[in-house]
Amino acid sequence: MSDRKHRVGIFGGTFHPIHYGHLIIAENACEQFDLEQVVFMPTGHTPHKVYAGPDMDRHRCRMVELAIADNPKFCISYREIRSDSVNYTYQTLRQLHDEFPETAFYFILGADSLFDFHQWKHPELICEEAVVLAAVRDDLNESRVDAQIHALTVQLHGEIHRLNTPNFNISSKNIRERIQDGRSIRYLTPDPVVQYIRQNHLYR
């Protein structure tokens, strides 16, 4: 019997809405780091963003469910979105580690977040509880990212890796703006998400 730990990615975000860029990052994380599963964890109350309210929580979760339905390696967690208090990443990862001690967690974030990672709440504890995967897009300077990874690794005594992903130059904000301007969002997010947004008149 193997003593190898289960390898699970934790991918937090507002997913407001989820799009192909998110899915590409998760798929590449599975491939590059041999992850058995990636857990999409929509954020609830966060210290850095305005809370959009319970109705939008429901919509964001439903869009994630629709987007990941056809991939058996992807699942959703409602852990943070069901919490009434502010959610800090280090607390969530510590809870997961306590509940699933036989699992090695990989925390997925955008490489741009590395440059303010030291300002997060207890980044050293995040590094204690998980390997950090920094998703790099083509518009970020890889050598600059690598230098930041090295600096944080030394500073926080953590394990941080570059996650290479194809460039997908779209954001949730851009999708919302396109909807407000009456432009198409087809091919930017899975069709079931496009239909859900249309049926529920979101972001208009």
Image: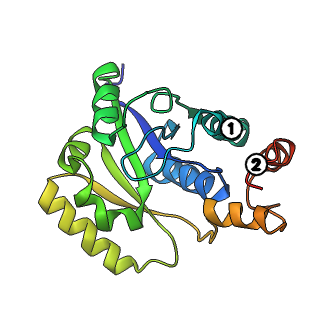
Residue type of the residue flagged with mark 1: His
Give the mark, 1 or 2, whose residue is nearer the N terminus. 1
**In the rendered image, the vertical position of residue 107 relative to residue 173, given as above or below:** above
Q: Residue at x 73, y 54 (%)?
A: 203
Along the horizontal axis of the image, is 15 left or right of 195? left
Residue nearer the viewer, 34 or 158 = 158
Which picture quadrant has residue 144? bottom left
Could you say where residue 38 lies in the image, as x and y percent from the top left? 51, 39
Task: Determine the secondary structure under disc 1.
Answer: helix
Residue 105 in percent (x, y) is at 36, 37
The residue singled out by tag 1 in the image is 59
Query: Is 202 positioned to the left or the right of 79 in the image?
Result: right
Q: Are marks 1 and 2 in contact (CB under 8 Å)?
A: yes
What is the count of numbered marks?
A: 2
Task: Return the residue nearer the eye: 81 or 18.
Answer: 81
Residue position marked by numbered label 2 in the rendering: 202
**Residue lying at 41% horizontally and 80% vertically, measured from the top left:** 141
Closer to us: 140 or 18:
18
Q: Is residue 38 above or below residue 198?
A: above
Residue 32 position, x and y percent, is: 47, 54
Tag 2: amino acid: Leu
- In the rendered image, the vertical position of residue 6 relative to residue 52, given as above or below: above
Left or right, 44 with reference to 86: right
Q: Secondary structure at mark 2?
A: loop
Picture quarter with the N terminus: top left
